[in-house]
Image: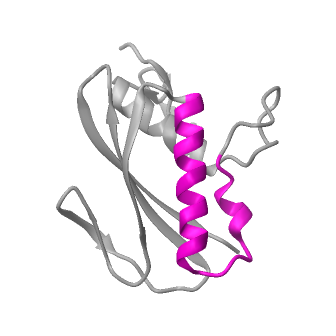
Amino acid sequence: MFGLSPKLPVQRDPSTGFALTKTYEEMIKQNLKNLVLTSPGERMMDINFGVGIRDFLFEPNIQEVYEEIDDRIRTQVTTYMPFVEVRRIKFFSGEDISIRGQIRGRVDAHPNKLHLAIEYFILPLGVLNALAVSVDLV
């Protein structure tokens, strides 16, 4: 079976050796998640790569911080994934996560967790998709 890239985190697969992403949608979703979770300076040879969501560890849980995170995500996606258009970024705390009208689960209102959903459009494929990210900030 063919694959486009290794699935992260790396997993063993008895038939191919390692689990692989099989579709462009799956690969783009994985790359977007890596972009959000990577801190600037963490990636070798490109110190500007990454949103650095964990850099907000001691920031207050307020709208201004959400706006800064939103801006970072949009800027990074425009720079590193220009074939993706971010449609909406929604932050959650203590409520149901709803992405594209589908309930994805309930979020606990823990003050040390950040939950967000990114709705994005893959331009070359004409596909609307969403990524939910939960980050433990401690």
Q: Residue at x 75, y 37 (%)?
A: 48
At x 74% / y 77%, what residue is drawn? 58
| Residue 11 at least partly seen | no
Q: Is residue 81 visible?
A: yes
Quadrant of image for the N terminus: top left
Colour scheme in use? one colour
Measured along the vertical axis of the image, is residue 89 above or below residue 107? Answer: above
Image check: 92 left or right of 5? left
Question: Does residue 67 belong to the magenta stretch?
Answer: yes
Count of numbered labels shown in the rendering? 0
Q: Residue at x 55, y 48 (%)?
A: 73
Residue 117, position as x, y percentages in the image: 40, 59
- Residue 91 place in picture, x, y as percent: 44, 69
Main SS class of the magenta portion in the image: helix
Q: Is residue 84 above or below residue 56?
A: above
Q: Nearer the viewer, residue 34 or 117?
A: 117
Q: Nearer the viewer, residue 109 or 83?
A: 83
Q: Judge by depth and name the residue closer to the eye, 124 or 17.
A: 124
- Above or below, 64 relative to 90: below
115 and 13: which one is in front? 115
User: Which of the 4 image quadrants contains residue 23?
Assistant: top left
Q: Residue at x 53, y 85 (%)?
A: 110
Please say whether residue 127 is one of the residues in the magenta stretch.
no
| Residue 46 quadrant | top right
Q: Which residues are magenta?
A: 51-80
- Residue 15 x/y as whole percent: 41, 22
Q: Position of residue 138 (x, y in %)?
A: 70, 75
In the displayed structure image, the side of residue 125 where residue 33 appears, left or right: right
